[in-house]
Amino acid sequence: MQVKNVWKVIPVAKFASLTELVKAMEGIGINFGWHAGRLLKAIEGKFSLPTQETNVAVVTNETLSLGPAVPLTQFYQEAVSQGYKLCTPELGLLTRLAFLPGEQVELQELWWIYIAMEPVLLDDGKSYIFRIAVGTRGARFDAVDVDASAESEAKDKWLFEASE
């Protein structure tokens, strides 16, 4: 199935390690939230960058013809049934790295873009996903906990990998 609403093409990035990628992001002024730092440590040993350009799409409840609030599991299932794929954590990082400074104004209404990914269980017993903040206060990369009762609400924007 072909997904037509590609939002951005994420180029192949060559970093030897997750630490090198994070340092590059910090070097251009990307701020990391506390939860994002914890999540980065949890995925460090599983780090693997995409080997080809990747299309990503911003998906909402409306995009999927869903109601104003649906369980996150249902939202993910519907997105996958419509041809989207869950992102890897690395794709979330590369998407944030791919923003250009001028896009912050253009995308100001997308305050949080949640990375549609498998949640990662951390040592506090909670599962987390990454999210990207885009707005007038600059850009930030953070994480948020999701549990079994998590929902996608009408205002939420989700980043999925899109088919070519």
Image (tube, grey):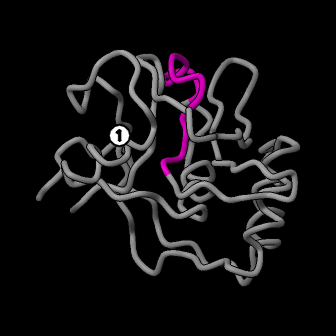
Residue occupying image coordinates x 86% and y 59%: 123
Residue 133 appears left or right of 76: right
Q: In this view, does 71 lie above or below 31?
A: above
Q: In x, y percent, where is residue 91?
A: 53, 61
Q: Is residue 114 magenta?
A: yes
Q: Which residue lies furthest to the front in this view?
A: 148
Residue occupying image coordinates x 72% and y 58%: 121
Q: In x, y percent, where is residue 95?
A: 54, 52
Which part of the image, by quadrant, shows the N terminus? bottom left
Q: Pick the residue in front: 139 or 41.
A: 41
Q: Badge 1 local density, few (<14 within 10 Å), some, or many (20+)?
A: few
Q: Label 1 is placed on what type of residue?
A: Gln
Q: In x, y percent, where is residue 62?
A: 27, 23
- The residue labelled by disc 1 is 74
Q: What stretch is highlighted in magenta?
A: 104-116
Q: Is residue 13 above or below residue 45?
A: above
Residue 137 appears left or right of 3: right
Residue 52 appears left or right of 50: left
Residue 148 quadrant: top right
Residue 22 quadrant: bottom right
Q: In this view, does 40 lie above or below 134?
A: below
Q: Pick the residue in front: 6 or 101.
A: 6
Residue occupying image coordinates x 53% and y 46%: 115
- SS at circle 1: helix
Which part of the image, by quadrant, shows the C terminus? bottom left
Residue 138 appears left or right of 129: right
Residue occupying image coordinates x 52% and y 23%: 110
